[in-house]
Image: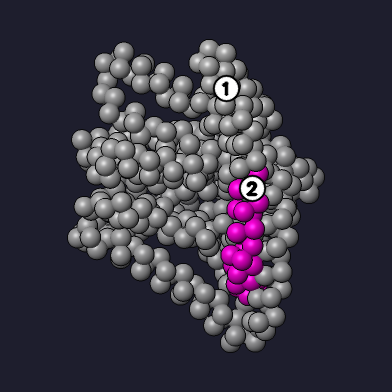
Amino acid sequence: MLAHIWFFFFLIAFVSGLYQWLVLGNGEIFSELIGATFDMSKLSVEIALGLVGVLCLWLGFFKVAERAGVVAVLARWLGPLFERLMPDVPKGHPAVGSVTMNLGANVLGLDNAATPIGLKAMKDLQTLNKQTPDTASNAQILFLVLNTSSVTLLPVTVFLYRAQQGAAEPASVFLPILLATTASTIVGVAAVAWLQKLRLWDRVVMLYLAGFVLLLSSLMYGLASLPAEAMAATSTLAGNLTLMCVIMLFLTVAYFRKVDVYESFVTGAKQGFGVALKIIPYLVAMLVAIGVFRASGALDGVLYGLEWVVAGLGFNTDFVAALPTAFMKPLSGSGARAMMLETMNTYGVDSFPALVSATIQGSTETTFYVLAVYFGSVGIKKVRHAIACGLIADLAGIITAIFAAYWFFY
C-alpha cells in the first residue's frame, strides 16, 4: 500500500504540474517541483540529525531504567492489558514497559521524550518479529496507530503558538483538542482491533479503560477549572515536572540497586546516532513525495473542490479555511504547523478558522512521518494495514475537531 501511495504522490504532482504549465501558463512550476525535492531532502537530513542528541539522551536514560528493573515493573503492572491488546508479546517483555512510557510521554505532550522512547519500543517489538523482519507485526501496527492518534492531555505547543500570535486566551482550545484526540485514539484502536480480532470488550480491558477515563476526566476537570491564562503555564509545569521526576526515579532506583548509572547511560546513548542515521532514507523518500505534492498545487485544488461541494450541500463553509492544516497533518508536521500559522495570520488568531486549525493541529500526530521514522528505524517495508488504520484515526480526529470547534466557538 505504501508503494502505491508514494507513487501516486509523484504522479498527481506531475499531472498537476502539466496542467499549470499548459493550461494556466505557469512556466515556473517544474522549477518549483524540483526545488521542493531538494528542500525536502535537506529537511530530512536536518530532522534526522536534529534527533541525534535527544535520541542519545533518552536512550541513555532508558538503559538505566532497564538495568534498574523499572521497565520490568511497568511491564508487570500492564501485563494483563497488553496480553489482550498485543497477544503476540510475551508477558513481562521489555516492550511493554517502553510502549507504556512512550504513551505516557505522548499524553503529557512531551514530544522530545516520546520519539526516542517510541523508537526503543519499536525496536523491542521488532525482536519478536524474527520470521518476517521486513513486515510490520500486529503489535507494531497497534503501537504505530496509538502514536499517530496521539492522545495528548497537554497540547502545550499549540498553546504557545497561539500565545505568540497574541491570542486573548491561548488555552481556550484545550477541551476541543482533548475531545478530538480522544476520538482519534478510540477510532484508531477500534479499527486495529476489528482487523486483528482483538477482544476489546474483555472485562480486563474495560477495567483498564475505566481507570484511564477516570484519570483523564480528573485531570481534565482540574485543568478546566483553572483560569484560561493559567492553563498553559500549569500544563507546561506539570509536563516538565513529571519528566524530571521520571528521570530522577530512573537514576535513584538504579543508584540504590548498585547499577553503574554513568556507564549504563553511555551504553544506551551510543545507540542514538545509529538510529538517527538509519531513518534518513525513509524520511527522504516520504518528505520528498509530500513536498512535490504540495508544491504542485494539487492540495489547493482539493480544497477548492471540497469547498464547492460543501457550499453546494448548503452547509456552513467557515471551517474550510482551516482545512489546509487538516490535509497537511497526516503528511507533514512542519507543513501542518505552517498552515496553522498562515491561517492565524490571514484571519486572526482568535478567528473561527484559526480556532478550528489549532484544534486540528492538536488532534493527531503526523501519520506518514511517524510511519517513516518508526518503521524505518527497524527496517520495516511492508506496513500492512498500518496506514489505513492511521488515516482512519486521523479522519476521526479531524472531523471531531471541526464539530468541537463549532460547539465551543461558533
Give me the disc on residue 27.
1
Label 1 or label 2, whichever lies nearer to me, is 1
How many residues crowd mark 2 within 10 Å: few (<14), some (14–19), many (20+)? some
Picture residue at 30% right of the left edge, 14% below the top? 313
Examine the image and state in which quarter residue 321 appears.
top left
Examine the image and state in which quarter residue 67 appears.
bottom right
> Camera-side residue: 283 or 402?
283
List the residue tagged with mark 2. 42
Q: Is residue 337 above or below residue 309?
A: below
Q: Please identify the quadrant where the N terminus is shown.
A: top right
Pinpoint residue 31: horizontal percent, then vertical percent: 61, 30
Q: Amino acid at mark 2?
A: Lys
Is 383 placed left or right of 336 in the picture?
right
Pinpoint residue 373: horizontal percent, then vertical percent: 63, 48
> Camera-side residue: 271 or 107?
271
Q: From which residue to which does the magenta span run?
A: 41-67
> Camera-side residue: 128 or 286?
286
- Residue extending farthest right: 131
Of the two numbered discs 1 and 2 on the same chain, state the one appearing first in sequence. 1
Residue 178 lies in the magenta stretch: no
Q: Tag count in the figure?
A: 2
Element carrying mark 1: loop
